């Protein structure tokens, strides 16, 4: 069973003079226990899509099924019950300003009619889970952004949800806090076997936590796949733009020694070991790194390097072929821009 | 001066004013707050968005608020008689006071409730809260500082409304000021009643401000 199934979702806003199509024919299936990313530029419809999952936004057409229940068919009361099993956190936390940390976390329990005593025990558990013991009596105004998001996470987990929706949950946080919140989400997801759906415009966030990713553009789903696949060989222009957004310098690299400038992108096993040197040595050519980095996507190594290859052109070609057989994506730079593959 | 002031009458009038203000404020809040909640819920893009209902409700509130109190009081005499069995006296004066102040308070409550972050309401919806639960557990607690400061404003307004209650034999400080200060040219009585009313307003506003500040410090 899939945790979430979105079938031909369409959302049209017909409020003003002109109808606006926010989502167009989006079909998406998310497996249980996955950390799923939805990425896109602002206005691409990614938040709207996320809000369709718990029907905060009701699609104009299409069906939404979460944990086997078709939400789009439910009566309001039944929908409220199902919503309680879908956690959600937001960019601006949305905590009750007039309630303490403990009361904020207890809020969904009260809604569900859990007795006070029992709720107290659960709140203590949850606050420990998110690392906020000792802050029970504080008000949100007394907390930092990261702490507020931790309260929101505790609140979202109160009813043991199977699914957690994150709407730009780290976009209002500084880089260090973002890291710690992402670490927390990862550990919770692993511990509880949650399905997490995370909307963000930051590739770096997706890169750190997601197993699979969907790319949205102008209300459409333009690309979808395992993280490594999307990062190594992006199919859609928007995906490439998003990938390059974090590394503008890569666009400015030019040959230094009259050789061939090549961009090598690979992930997993292909990105391990001295693969550039190996290819150069076996073809008696030389390689020098102009720009780039080797970091990680989720738990795999991920290399994105711009190199200059010098030597006899057929041999250089041979070296690049070796890399490609290894599983690397190769782009060659020419005057008019990057040319895909060989 | 001040030698022939009838102090017992002044204290009695103060008591009558306090009675009208307190009961009037309490009833205006009890009636105005739900109206304020409905005004918010029915307004466009809110939980129960319903344009016709909102417009009718809004119109009723505006009509009641646009009638000057002195006229409202006289116009309501038959209604007051029907409700209280009499149209004369302090209790009878409370009816027009409430009819005048409840819509006023409804607007103040509406403004306070509108300040509640829509994101918080949305978060509650995402947690499966019903509209009723959102009103009770989100809207009202989150807006409590504004709701309270609206009550204080209404109480202060009722001090001046209640001064007109003398017209229908409601008694109170306003009535005393007119009967002694105006009819008998006893300026000193007039001055004393004004001072008493000023003290009343100061005390109510002071206590209210302190309480609102206390709620706000907690972020409410």
Image: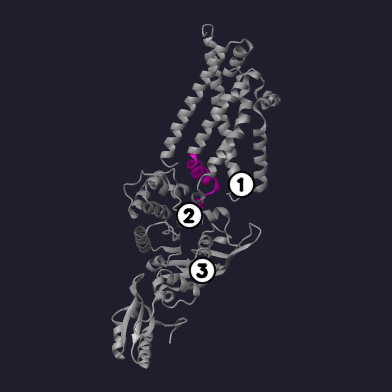
Q: Can residue A84 be seen in this view?
A: yes
Q: In this view, does A76 lie above or below B204?
A: below
**Picture quadrant where residue B67 is located:** top right
- Name the residue nearer the viewer: A257 or B49: A257
Can the viewer see residue A1? no
Q: Do labels 1 and 3 share a chain?
A: no
- In the image, residue B210 sits, relative to residue B170, either above or below, namely below
User: Is A321 drawn above or below residue B196 in the view shown?
Assistant: below
Q: Are marks 2 and 1 on the same chain?
A: no
> For mark 2, does the 10 Å Cα neighbourhood hold few (<14), some (14 to 19), or many (20 or more) residues?
many
Please tell me in which quadrant of the rendered image residue A180 appears.
bottom left
In the image, residue A179 lies in the stretch drawn in magenta: no
Residue B113 — which label? Answer: none
Which of marks 3 and 2 precedes in the sequence? 2
- Image quarter in which the C terminus of chain B is found: top left
Q: How far apart are marks 2 and 1 (CA)?
A: 26 Å
Label 3 sits on a secondary structure element that is strand
Question: At which x and y percent is residue B107?
Answer: 59, 38
Pointers 2 and 1 in contact (C-beta within 8 Å): no
Q: Which mark is residue B43?
A: 1
Residue extent of the magenta highlight: B122-144
Mark 3 belongs to chain: A
Cα distance, mark 2 to mark 3?
Answer: 27 Å
Asked if disc 1 and disc 3 are in contact, CB closer than 8 Å, the reply is no
- Count up the numbered dots: 3
Query: For mark 1, does the 10 Å Cα neighbourhood hold few (<14), some (14 to 19), or many (20 or more) residues?
Result: many
Q: Mark 2 points at which residue?
A: A84
Q: Residue A216 carries which label?
A: 3
Dominant SS of magenta comes to helix
Pointer 2 with pointer 3, Cβ within 8 A: no
């Amino acid at each position: 069973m899939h945790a979430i199934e979105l079938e031909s979702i369409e959302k049209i806003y017909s409020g003003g003079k002109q109808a606006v199509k926010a989502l167009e024919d989006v079909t998406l299936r998310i497996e249980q226990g996955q950390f799923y990313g939805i990425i896109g530029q602002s206005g691409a419809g990614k938040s709207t899509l996320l809000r369709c999952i718990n029907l905060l936004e009701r699609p104009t057409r299409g069906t939404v099924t979460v944990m086997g229940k078709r939400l789009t068919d439910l009566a309001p009361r039944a929908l409220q019950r199902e919503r309680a099993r879908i956690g959600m956190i937001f960019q601006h936390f949305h905590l009750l300003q007039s309630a303490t940390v403990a009361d904020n976390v207890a809020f969904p329990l009260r809604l569900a009619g859990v007795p006070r005593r029992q709720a107290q025990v659960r709140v203590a558990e949850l606050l420990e889970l998110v690392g906020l013991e000792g802050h029970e009596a504080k008000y949100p105004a007394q907390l930092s952004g990261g702490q507020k998001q931790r309260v929101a996470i505790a609140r979202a987990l109160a009813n043991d949800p199977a699914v957690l929706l994150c709407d730009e949950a780290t976009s209002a946080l500084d880089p260090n806090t973002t890291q710690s919140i992402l670490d927390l989400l990862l550990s919770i997801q692993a511990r509880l076997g949650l399905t997490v759906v995370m909307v963000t415009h930051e590739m770096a966030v997706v890169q750190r936590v997601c197993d699979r990713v969907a790319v949205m553009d102008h209300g459409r789903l333009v690309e979808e796949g395992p993280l490594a696949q999307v990062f190594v060989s992006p199919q859609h222009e928007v995906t490439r733009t998003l990938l390059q957004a974090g590394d503008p310098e890569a666009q400015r690299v030019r040959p230094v020694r009259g050789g061939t400038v090549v961009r090598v992108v690979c992930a997993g096993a292909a990105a391990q070991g001295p693969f550039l040197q190996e290819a150069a040595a076996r073809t008696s050519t030389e390689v020098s790194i102009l720009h780039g980095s080797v970091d990680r996507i989720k738990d795999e190594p991920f290399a994105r390097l711009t190199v200059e290859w010098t030597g006899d052109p057929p041999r250089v070609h041979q070296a690049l072929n070796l890399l490609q057989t290894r599983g690397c994506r190769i782009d060659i730079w020419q005057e008019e821009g990057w040319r895909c593959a060989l | 001066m001040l030698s022939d002031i009838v102090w017992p009458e002044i204290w009695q009038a103060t008591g009558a004013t306090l009675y009208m203000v307190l009961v009037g404020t309490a009833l205006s809040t009890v009636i105005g707050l739900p109206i304020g909640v409905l005004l918010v819920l029915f307004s466009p893009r809110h939980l129960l968005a319903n344009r016709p209902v909102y417009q009718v409700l809004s119109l009723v509130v505006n009509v009641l608020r646009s009638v000057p109190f002195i006229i409202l009081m006289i116009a309501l005499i038959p209604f007051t008689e029907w409700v209280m069995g009499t149209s004369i006296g302090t209790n009878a004066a409370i009816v027009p006071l409430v009819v005048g102040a409840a819509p006023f308070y409804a607007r103040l409550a509406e403004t306070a409730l509108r300040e509640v972050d829509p994101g918080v309401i949305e978060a509650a919806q995402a947690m499966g809260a019903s509209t009723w639960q959102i009103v009770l557990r989100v809207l009202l607690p989150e807006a409590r500082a504004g709701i309270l400061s609206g009550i204080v404003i209404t109480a202060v307004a009722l001090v001046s409304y209640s001064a007109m209650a003398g017209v229908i034999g409601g008694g109170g400080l306003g009535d005393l000021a007119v009967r002694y200060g105006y009819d008998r040219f006893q300026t000193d009585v007039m001055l004393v009643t004004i001072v008493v009313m000023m003290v009343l307003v100061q005390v109510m506003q002071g206590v209210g401000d302190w309480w609102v500040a206390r709620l706000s410090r907690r972020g409410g």
